[in-house]
Image: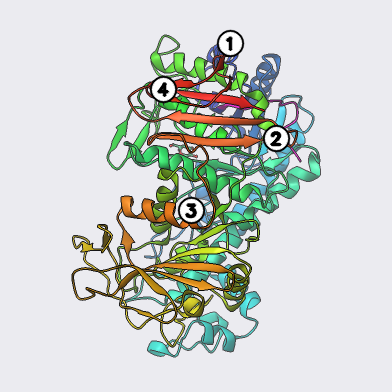
Amino acid sequence: MRWPKGLDGLCYGGDHNPEQWPPEVWTEDVALMRRARVNLVTVGVFAWSRLEPQPGRYDFDWLDRVLDLLHTGGIRVALATPTASPPPWFSLRHPDALPVTADGVRLQHGSRDTYCVSAPAYRRAAGEITAALAARYADHPALALWHVHNEYGTTCHCDHATEAFRRWLRTRYGGLDALNDAWTTSFWSQHYSDWAQIRTPVATRYLGNPAQLLDFRRFGSDELLGAYLAQRDLLRAATPDVPVTTNFVLGGWVPVDHARWSTELDLVAIDHYPTEAGPGAEEQTAFAADLARGWARHSPGGPGWLLMETAPNLILTPGRMHGKEPGRLLRHSLSYVARGSRGAMFFQWRASRGGAELFHSALLPHAGPRSRGFRETVELGETLDRLAEVDVGTVSTSVAVVRDAGSWWALQASVLPSAEVDHADEVAAVYRALWRAGLGCDVVEPGDDLSGYALVVLPMLYLVDDGYAARLRDYLASGGHLLVSYLSGVADEYGRIRLGGHPGALRDLLGIRVDEFQPLDPATRLSLSDGGTGRLWSEPVELAGATAVTTYTDGRLAGGPAVTRHAYGAGVAWYVSTRLDDDTYRRLAADVARAAGVTPTCPVAPDGVEAVRRRSADGRSWLFLLNHTDTAQTLPVAGLDLLTGGYVDPVTLPAGGCAVLRQS
Ligand code: GAL
């Protein structure tokens, strides 16, 4: 495993932006970092214009001083390449490297991420600054980790991007016949007779081609990965022993297949910013951490991974910043660590005085060290120190939720029967159901091995190729349990509808057939025979071997199956034809898990108390208990609480409090 040099235990720190401050602040920073037990900081992410103030003229003196100061203070550095924000001189010199939107508008500098990764001038300049940094700091003793770029996720429609897209398509399809077939270009006279006719999916008069959009996302992922690899290889050549990573951003607009990228990362690192201020933030945190844990299994640096950024004291919802209540910072941090994060890192160390993110929270707030925020920063550092031993533990579960970048992208096309349904949203709904039922799960990709799982969930897995359908049949035949939700198996890998009735690839194993979809308007609720409700989607499900578990009791489908169960081989396959309300989904998840022989992580944990277990190969285990309720909770479990250092039996968690019990 490649792990940052010189770092033991858990990482703690965040983005450090000394370029925004005069040198006297740098000294104070190091002193305060030491007080908070910060041991790793990311430096230089957006410092390109300070590092290369003029083309080819570098100024490293200030960075030398910063790294020396940090080293003297015993703080390790994740040194970033600054390529997510080219300096103004670059954009003015190379207007062809500025990105073009789907509407044909060329964006100008003045923010960040304003470049096209396919533009030769950008790639050249990014390579040069990367090589210069590598040469300068290869032997610096503070260097622990390379942090390439920041949150790869841009798209572009300029001529360079268009050329790159055509090259990618040639490799994928070999010839135009295959492309025309896969894209169904016979529709609306789109047949291509020359590669030069193909464009990125730019603005069109009316609906675009969904297969083209899907391939553009796949291309985007590979193209950005190429940009990452170019930098990674330069850094590796200079410092073969220093691991290289980049911070993943999670968002619907991001054309990155993170599972595929993870095979190329020495350490999977994610940035995570919950978007709900209420209890949803806890579920989102757990989900993001389990996602990263799944990706890390693809990485040579796994199974551990790193939370590279989150906000210390802030949840951003559209139009509003919510401060985190006291204790929430710790609970969220422990939720990531419980699920395998090798520490907790934040954006950012010191709050900025100006610039676009001047009101973003920080480990050191504007108010300075005499603040509630900084007190919690220090407490968190002390806590992570006490938890160092858990770093050897891994999480294992017997439930897998399959998430698929391709299905997500395919369902983003604007031509589907309902704009209200979304793969990521359905994955989140089923994850929430499992989380609320106290059931730990892995989030996996269609390529992952399913044999170790008692239960596999396919939430809206829209694209299913023949090979995957065959693997699912084998899984069921050998005794697996499968829970499938609507709009799964409907299309092939190119997004073409499978004929003969839905859910195409999965009809036989589910023992059902659906001959039409009946999406619902967002306000409609359909009652179900078990007292639950369905929304957003419904289907007339014909039984073809399956039995009805619940039925619709009103609307056009009254009396018809809503949830079905089908014995297949030695296994069982369940189907859900509507979006269940949260309580009903939770009950169903618990029932299906019970039938599959899966029990909750901590069966005595009451509602609102989250439990996650990490185990080490030498037989130790750590039970993380996070009380998200506003009352104290007592649970009949025993162990040494690493947070207090005392043995407990039973354990009492204060309102909003946590325990980490070492149990042998
Ligand atoms: C991240 C980004 C940081 C900062 C942060 C604010 O996505 O990497 O640079 O912008 O968001 O929440």
Mark 3 residue type? Arg
* Residue carrying label 3: 594
| Labels 1, 2: front one | 2
Find the distance from the CA under tag 3 to the CA under tag 1: 53 Å
Horizontal relation, residue 406 to residue 62: left or right = left
Q: Of marks 3 and 2, which one's residue comes earlier in the chain? A: 3
Point 70% across, 42% down: residue? 244
| Labels 2, 4: front one | 2
* Residue carrying label 2: 616
Find the distance from the CA under tag 1 to the CA under tag 4: 24 Å
Q: How crowded is mark 2: few (under 14 residues within 10 Å), some or many (20 or more)?
A: some
Mark 1 residue type? Ala
- Reply above or below: 299 against 618: below
Secondary structure of the residue carrying tag 1 is helix
Q: Of marks 3 and 4, which one's residue comes earlier in the chain? A: 4
Find the distance from the CA under tag 1 to the CA under tag 2: 35 Å
- For the N terminus, the image quarter is top right
Residue 582 in sight: yes
